[in-house]
Image: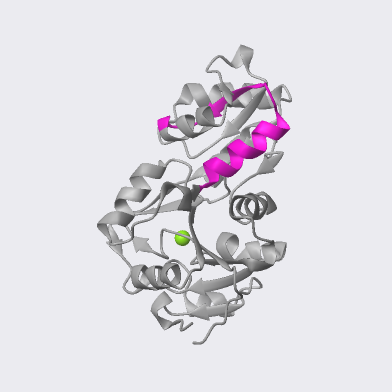
Amino acid sequence: MAFCPKPGSVFVFDLDGTVYLGDAAIPGAVQFINSLIQKGYGVILFSNNSSRSVSEVQKKLSRMGLEATAEQIVLSSHVAAAALQKLQPGKRCYALANPNLELILREQNIALTDDPKCADYVLLGFDTTLTYRKLQDAAMLLDSGKPYYATHPDINCPTADGFMPDTGAMIALLEVSTGRKPDLVFGKPELSTVEFICAKTDQPKECLIFIGDRLETDIAIGRNGVQTILVYTGITTPEIYAGSSIQADLAVQTLADITL
Ligand SMILES: [Mg+2]
């Protein structure tokens, strides 16, 4: 299928279900991305998964033949950190976060505390080190009215064995417990992610093309004025897409089906 990007276009790729599945590259994906880089287009590899580190994503892509720079790899963690710098400057964050997310927050000068009595606000991330203690602390802070944010909305994360509960599932748990939803959620499909990538690449949103397999995040972000391409290599089938109100600018079986 022919696709004619504007000069200066930046392709923002989802990872799970778009570039790879587990540890296996999706056929044609790496070649397609490398051809875009050779043609001079911008490429960003964006994951909502805030439990990852940049270096582990970079190494995984390298094993698949894609040599991405650290600057090309963006996580919802980066969007959250940049937004929290502006929203809560100098304030102390109680983060439900694993060490990878904590590191990104510290690198962006977010002050972290694990003492709920000292916390000014709560950030819920994809905390693969989550404990009942942290859930209890977060629930008490939410109940006392502290500002509350979440890195991304995904309910489940695909794994080699199926899936595991992701941040959206914990958002639901805390809502049932406390009656509160996050004041803001970052990551895809939110405007904060579009604005973050525009600032990072110095391009207007009209030049951004998001590519991914999940309608609620990768394609729903089109409502913010960016283009979207759906691939059927992950969780969305043509049957699901036909029945959805969320529509992409283009839908293809695999990235290999796109000709530039
Ligand atoms: Mg995906």
Relative to 185, say whether 198 is above or below.
below
Relative to 230, say whether 173 is above or below.
above
Q: Is residue 160 visible?
A: no
* Residue at far left of view: 63
Confirm whether the magenta stretch covers residue 83: yes
In this rendering, would 44 be left or right of 200?
Answer: left
Q: Residue at x 48, y 67 (%)?
A: 213
Q: Residue at x 69, y 53 (%)?
A: 191
Confirm whether the magenta stretch covers residue 227: no
Residue 194: give x, y in percent of width and height. 65, 55
Q: Quadrant of residue 220?
A: bottom right
* Highlighted magenta segment, given as a residue range: 75-99
Q: Is residue 147 visible?
A: yes
Q: Quadrant of residue 32?
A: bottom left
Q: Nearer the viewer, residue 187 or 32?
A: 32
Residue 94: give x, y in percent of width and height. 58, 24
